[in-house]
Image (cartoon, rainbow, N blue to C red):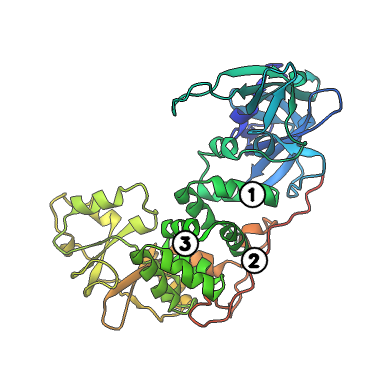
Amino acid sequence: MSATRVFVARLAGCTVFDPAGDRLGKVRDVLVVYRKNDPPRVVGLIVEIPGRKRVFVSIGRVTSISSGQIITTGLINVRRFEQRGGEVRVIAELLGRTVVFADGSGQATIEDVAIQEFGPGEWAVAQLFVRRPKTSSSPFAKGATVFANWSDVREKTAAGQAQSAEQLIATYSDLKPADLANTLLDLPQARMLEVAEELPDDRLADVLEEMPESEQVEILAQLDDDRAADVLDQMQPDDAADLIAQLSEERGEHLLELMQPEEADDVRMLLAYAPDTAGGLMTTEPIIVSADATVAEGLALIRRHELAPALGAAICVTLPPYEPPTGRFLGMVHFQRMLRYPPHERLGTLLDQGLEPVTADTSAAEVSRILASYNLVSVPVVDDNHRLVGVVTIDDVLDYLLPDDWRSNDSDDDTPERVPDRAPTRALSGAPRLTPRGRRTGNGTR
């Protein structure tokens, strides 16, 4: 094995392979334990395998770390990782800590950690990459960076105590929201809340949409009302409605009053529908255009990077106004069909004449059958006056059909079973409240 030093922050996201070259998963963190007189010893890697499950891979089973990839013996324990006392995650807990130089020259913040193999299967922290406080008053200035040996510094606080979450957020900046949500759920509770508070509003909104409801409520409870309302504004209306429904009626109403009026109106409308109907599942932000809009205009709207793929699969055509509830619904134009026509073609001539909308009170089971029967990604929802009020997408239906604990299911072989009469989740409209999903647990051992 190469004795080249490896920086832990650069390992995040690296692919892990078995000896045959088959992909096992991706590195999410490095686990170390402190020693009395020597630098911390590396005990293993936290690896995310298919199914978004985090498992422990002993450093003794790692045969090579180089060129952004890691080779292992191929033998891993697939039980969910569970952190033991005395263990420290480098990325999640060590980066961002404040250290004090032993020579009295001041303090610095750990930005990266270099690990190195000192013997067969024996890895330890080699050096710390730290940044001193800035000396200039310029807002763009940064402090000097230096490499320091572990013996040259001492931590300003006790081992295991979390410091600034900024370094962790920067390290995981490229993670998809679902992966970042999974990462936060694996952190100690205090650390999870600290990192969540440091995330930008839009990033936190994306992460909350991927979390179980109990953790959503827990994080939202740590935010002041103004910040919580800003985050809810950034969420998809249907996800925001589900989250508000888990809060007390008093706080839910207060947050709705603090939200942007247009966003709050969408959420209030969704709260009025039963959760097991098309109205309860739908999102109120599809692409809506007039019949005179062209293929070029439609494709330009689909290209927006913030648009969810399921919403970009088709465009809704209505009479004015073009905000739900719209004027009379005319039909939908599928993305693939637009690609077959010239840019100047009017969308009103390309409507799917065979697609019938559903009403807001259509059962979720019927919506599921329609999507499956006609191989659709989304289906439009109209009110009694045939005005478009939203669309139900395939991800909305999957979230409904999967069991409540699907995000934390440890078994890859279990087949989800549909609970026939699912308890409603939205409480502000007078419906009973669903028992919050439990925090994910695991029995990972090694």
Q: Which residue is mark 1?
A: 192
Marks 1/3: CA distance? 26 Å
Task: Give above or below for 395 relative to 116.
Answer: below
Quadrant occupied by the N terminus: top right
Q: Name which of mark 3 and mark 2 comes first in the sequence.
A: 3
Residue at the (72%, 18%) spot, across then down = 104
The amino acid at mark 2 is Arg
Task: Give above or below for 293 relative to 123.
Answer: below
The amino acid at mark 1 is Met
Residue 366 visible, this orientation: yes
Q: Which residue is mark 2?
A: 437
In front of the other: 440 or 47: 440
Q: Position of residue 219 (x, y in %)?
A: 59, 57
Task: Give above or below for 362 relative to 405.
Answer: below
Disc number lying in front (2 or 1): 1
Residue at the (28%, 73%) spot, across then down = 325
Q: Mark on residue 395?
A: 3
